[in-house]
Image (spheres, rainbow, N blue to C red):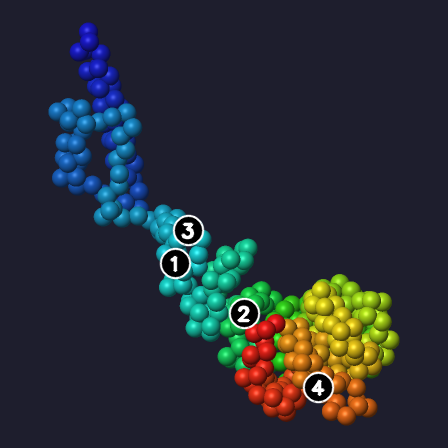
Amino acid sequence: METWRPCGMHLRVLSSSVQNNSSDLKHKKDENHCVTKYDSSDLHQESSQVSLSNTHNIGLDAVVRPSPFQEICEEEALRIQVPSALPPVSFTLRPYVDQSETLSKLVQLGVDLWKLEQRPNVGSMLVKLDFHADVAPRLLFLKDLGVEESKLGSLLTKNPFILTESLENLEARVAYLRSKKFSAQSVAAMVSKAPYLLNFSVKRLDNRLGFFQQLLGLSSEKTQNLVIRLPKLLCGSLEPVKENLKVCELEFGFRENEIRQIVTTVPKVLLADKRKLTQIFDFVHNTMGISHSLIAKFPQVLNAKFLRIRERHLFLEYLSRAQYQPSQPSYISLDRLVILPDEIFCSDVALATLEDFEQFQKTL
């Protein structure tokens, strides 16, 4: 009995397989437009594959695979899915560059893909873009706007999302800026300096211009000059701006007209680090003895490096030449103190050699 039961089970499976095979052959003969009919050699070959002598090769899960030379109908051909040449999953954009025209063109423009792939969802967004439909029209728009081709790579590295903005929105925002008397050259320069500028709606741009004009009491022309020099004011958060204005007024003690003079001359003061700004003001005003009015007259000192101010002042003090009052002889202005390179500062201001200044720096 141990030898009979398996044999019977194989026979039942064999019988079922042969019946199914015959049924399949009959069904295939009826489908004249889809599959080529079998000839006698095919039937003989098919029959030999299920002969009793090979029953040990047929299992319960046996599957008859179609021949690669078998003809199929149009409907079946349309259902065939060809796998993409792109890798299904990757942690870097490098494997996609050779297969993606968009990525290869962006690399040629100077876009740093390694920076973009570190930002959430940016890599998948770029892979899905079509170069001719999505990327090329926006590149032409930026070029027509006046953005230099050499700056496109840097712009797109900082703001790849401009490639997903509609051309209608981009054109509307440029038209708004032009209606506010910004020249074409100014708009191009602003977009190059602040790549996210055209991602913001016309309403937001209008609100920002009105905010700075009212808060600082500026004319339309001075407001334009302010944002042309620092277009990030239209894009970033307003909290640092409000905080620095409050610090200048309440902690430093500047008057309203002095603050206006400072920010229109050096707009970066509005976005400067509060700790750095406080450190410089404290040294210039309390250690060097410079009045509020003189600082407002030469506000570049608030944007200089603290180490440079400190080293040069101490060197002048060592030489007994630290004289910053305009009414006194040997007067040294703040702009000459911080703007001039070391060699010219030593020869024209300190009346010393560069070697003397370098030796003094080693003592600090």
What amino acid does circle 3 point to?
Pro
Marked residue nearer the N-terminal end (1 or 2): 1
Residue placed at 55% from the left, 55% from the top?
Answer: 120
Marked residue nearer the N-terminal end (4 or 2): 2
What amino acid does circle 4 point to?
Arg
Q: CA distance from mark 1 to mark 2?
A: 20 Å
Foreground residue among 210 and 102: 210
Q: Quadrant of residue 362?
A: bottom right
Residue placed at 47% from the left, 64% from the top?
Answer: 113
What amino acid does circle 2 point to?
Leu
Foreground residue among 225 and 97: 225
Q: Are marks 2 and 3 in contact (CB under 8 Å)?
A: no
User: In this rendering, which labeled residue sits more in front, label 4 or label 3?
Assistant: 4
Foreground residue among 164 and 213: 213
Residue placed at 54% from the left, 69% from the top?
Answer: 156
Q: Position of residue 33 (x, y in %)?
A: 31, 48
Crowding at label 1, few (<14), some or many (≥20) Cα neighbours within 10 Å?
A: few
Give the labeled residue for mark 3.
Answer: 88
Compared with 38, 137 (above or below) is below
Hey, which residue is sitting farthest top in the picture?
Answer: 1
What amino acid does circle 1 point to?
Pro
Q: Position of residue 331 (x, y in %)?
A: 75, 90
Marked residue nearer the N-terminal end (1 or 3): 3
Crowding at label 2, few (<14), some or many (≥20) Cα neighbours within 10 Å?
A: many
